[in-house]
Image (spheres, rainbow, N blue to C red):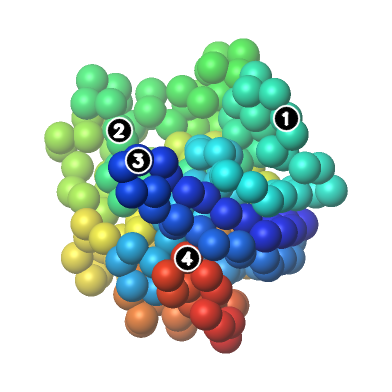
Amino acid sequence: MIEVKNLTRTYEGRVPTQALKGVSFEVEAGEFLAIMGRSGCGKSTLLHQLGLLDTPTSGEVTIDNENVLELLDREQAEFRLKRLGYVFQEYALLPELTVLEAVYLPLMIQGTEKKEYIEKAVEMLEKVGLKDRLNHLPAELSGGEQQRVAIARAIVNTPKILFADEPCANLDSESSQDVLELFCELNKKTGQTIIMVTHEKEDREYVERVIWMKDGLIEREE
């Protein structure tokens, strides 16, 4: 489903920084994969290239036999909106939007009918256990609840691939477990491909495969 070939990313400056030094691997459809390693090893940089949030210096990223790096900016934006979902360390919820509004926003942007996008948002919030929080604002939620809102928002458009960048970094252990169990449920019940960056070694028990990175390269897989 995803094929990465010799991916590099160099950040220019007085002293150029080579964050990725030629990364190649594949991800099967429906796989739950973790990318792990020490801070600064390139794992978040790699995720951003795969999710079309940044442009690599060289290499290829193929998703469903399509070289997505060759798409025009407009085409990449549409690809992200319709086929990819994102969950970040920071929940990125707009403070003035209710839980329901935050979740249906991606569908509204796509031009989905109002009745449909509201129904779908409610369905996703029920899936993540927040149906009784529809009209709450982010400030009225715990960190774990805010992250579940972010997950509902990420999956409301039924993306084929979900990217998660340190999704539990700001959560306590109980909330982290809830989020990871939710990822497992999504992966098993819907067959959704999930690629998660994490530095927590205990997260390995939730995923099918781990790619370990070191100094911009894949060190090993397990």
- List the residue tagged with mark 1: 71
Q: Nearer the viewer, mark 1 or mark 2?
A: 1
Q: Could you give the CA–CA distance between mark 3 and mark 2, rounded to whole angstroms?
A: 32 Å
Would you name the residue on which mark 4 appears? Answer: 216
Residue at the left extreme, as displayed: 139
Q: State the separation of the CA atoms marked 1 and 4.
A: 25 Å
Measuring 48% from the left and 49% from the top, which residue is drawn there?
Answer: 10
In the foreground, 180 or 214? 214
User: Are there few (<14), some (14-19), or many (20+) residues within 10 Å of tag 4?
Assistant: many
User: Which structural element holds mark 3?
Assistant: loop
Q: Cα distance, mark 3 to mark 4? A: 18 Å
Confirm or deny contact between disc 3 and disc 4 (CB under 8 A).
no
The amino acid sitting under disc 2 is Leu
Image coords of residue 139 (percent x, y) = 15, 35
Amino acid type assigned to the residue bearing label 1 in the image: Leu
Please give the label number shown on residue 93.
2
User: Which of pointers 1 and 3 lies earlier in the amino acid sequence?
Assistant: 3
Q: Earlier in the sequence, mark 4 or mark 2?
A: 2
Q: Nearer the viewer, residue 206 or 199?
A: 199
Q: Residues within 10 Å of mark 2 (few under 14, many from 20)?
A: some
Looking at the rendered image, the quarter that the C terminus falls into is bottom right
Residue marked by disc 3: 13
